[in-house]
Amino acid sequence: MDLRGGFRPRPRPGRRPAPHRPAGRFPVTVSPTRVRAALTTAFACTGLTMATWVSRTPAIRDVTHSSTGQMGLVIAGLSAGSLVGIAVGGTYVARAGARSVVRTGMLAIAAGSVVVAAGAGLGHAPLVALGLALLGFGMGSGEIALNVEGVALEAAVRRTVVPSLHGAYSSGLCVGALLGLAANATRLPVPAHLLAVAVLTAAATGWLVRNLAPGTGREERRASNVPLRETVGGFLSVWRETRTLAIGVIVLGMALAEGSAGDWLPLIVVDGFSLTATTGALVYAFFGAAMAAGRFGGGHFLDRHGRTPVVVASAAAAVVGIALVSFAPGIEVAVAGVLLWGLGAALGFPVALSAAGDDPVGAARRVSAVATMGYLAFLVGPPVLGFVGEHVGLRGAILLVLVVVAVSGAFARAVAEPPVHPAREAA
């Protein structure tokens, strides 16, 4: 397989040819199999850490004596840190390369878990919020770097890769939620649980970083001492691009659909259906499994039907699923809604990030800008849903998510694949 020209599978009869992807900057000395394994590990560890926090939110709420509204503010620490990470991630990927940012992000995730563990052990909500901010910074900056790596890998192998990488994140969510279920059932102390995951993440980081190429995403003209105002100006310039803004709207809705489940689904089960925290963790694990299935299987539908129809179908499924959870008379119907919610939220975020990186020139800045829109949803969503939930209940509050997802589906044409140019295809 020639990574410089890429591998393009011959279309099967009756199938839509895989979308053209311009060749990206990807060192030929690096095995794509090793790179994919490293990226899969990084996404899985991130999902595992996230699910560990989410599955223990009822216990953390209890030990910190926080109300629903106060928990919304605590959770907002995660999104605030993520936005800072997103804001600097694109610039420093362009300066130092994605691998360096992945290393920093993964270590910040591990450190943030340690601080959250300390806050839970002391029953101190502000310390939990601080730890979540550090964890969010690692996730936000790492999100940019990991997706830049993933888009470069797609360009090299000429196949859909990014959704399956996000599927590894969802698998990590599922495994983490199941471990959280066991931890809740056995009353494992929250600090011990979080510390164990932090150690695992830090250990995995050392291995996976060695299997990533050092220069992916780095722009040569930014490798030298470029004035800060120029790097900031380059980041801001992408906000003037109509397509980038439209992709950002899609990410806004889909990230809200994914993030609201991560922030509130266990508490929806506990407070909205009067069930146990263990059941809440189990339902959240089911949501993670649904997202993993959607992401691992999504490449087939994307290569066959294209991005736009898949995003439209995803938004429709998420809308129906959220509605079922909101209006369900019992947990059985709600679980069916969680299935559709997870499948619908699965592909929007990775597909939009992949579309933002179609052009390798400036890919880091566009991915950063689009991801910022997603993390804006993560930042605004928790306190807003918490505030509304105190007045109408969390099951009523998620109808706001339904509306935003429906609007995002109307912008699906923005993620359409770039046209195939015969001269470039021949090359």
Image: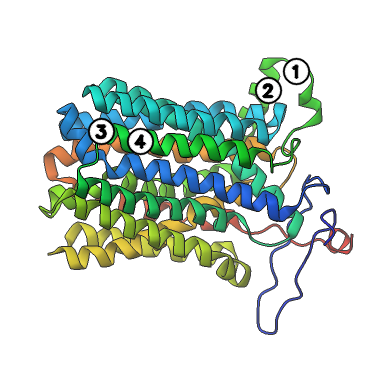
382 is higher (above) or lower (below) than 35: above
* Direction from residue 379 to residue 57 in the image, left or right: left
- Colour approach in the figure: rainbow
Helix, strand or loop under label 1: loop
Q: Position of residue 240 (x, y in %)?
A: 61, 35
Helix, strand or loop under label 3: helix
**Closer mark to the observer between disc 2 and disc 4:** 4
Q: Amino acid at mark 3?
A: Gly
Which quadrant of the view contains residue 231? top right
The residue wearing badge 2 is 231
Q: Amino acid at mark 1?
A: Val
**Closer mark to the observer between disc 3 and disc 2:** 3
Q: Earlier in the sequence, mark 2 or mark 1?
A: 1
Q: Earlier in the sequence, mark 1 or mark 3?
A: 3
389 is higher (above) or lower (below) than 424: above
Asked whether disc 2 touches disc 4, contact meaning CB atoms under 8 Å apart, the reply is no
How many neighbours does mark 3 have within 10 angstroms: few (below 14), some (14-19), or many (20 or more)? many
**Closer mark to the observer between disc 4 and disc 3:** 4
Q: Amino acid at mark 4?
A: Leu
Q: Position of residue 304 (x, y in %)?
A: 61, 72
* Direction from residue 261 to residue 310 in the image, left or right: right
Q: Amino acid at mark 2?
A: Thr
Q: Is residue 149 visible?
A: yes
CA gap, disc 4 to disc 1?
A: 40 Å
Q: Residue at x 18, y 41 (%)?
A: 389
Asked whether disc 4 touches disc 3, contact meaning CB atoms under 8 Å apart, the reply is no
Give the numbered dot on residue 72.
Answer: 3
CA gap, disc 3 to disc 2?
A: 34 Å
Give the numbered dot on residue 194.
Answer: 4
Give the numbered dot on residue 226.
Answer: 1
* Direction from residue 315 to residue 165 in the image, left or right: right
Asked whether disc 2 touches disc 1, contact meaning CB atoms under 8 Å apart, the reply is yes
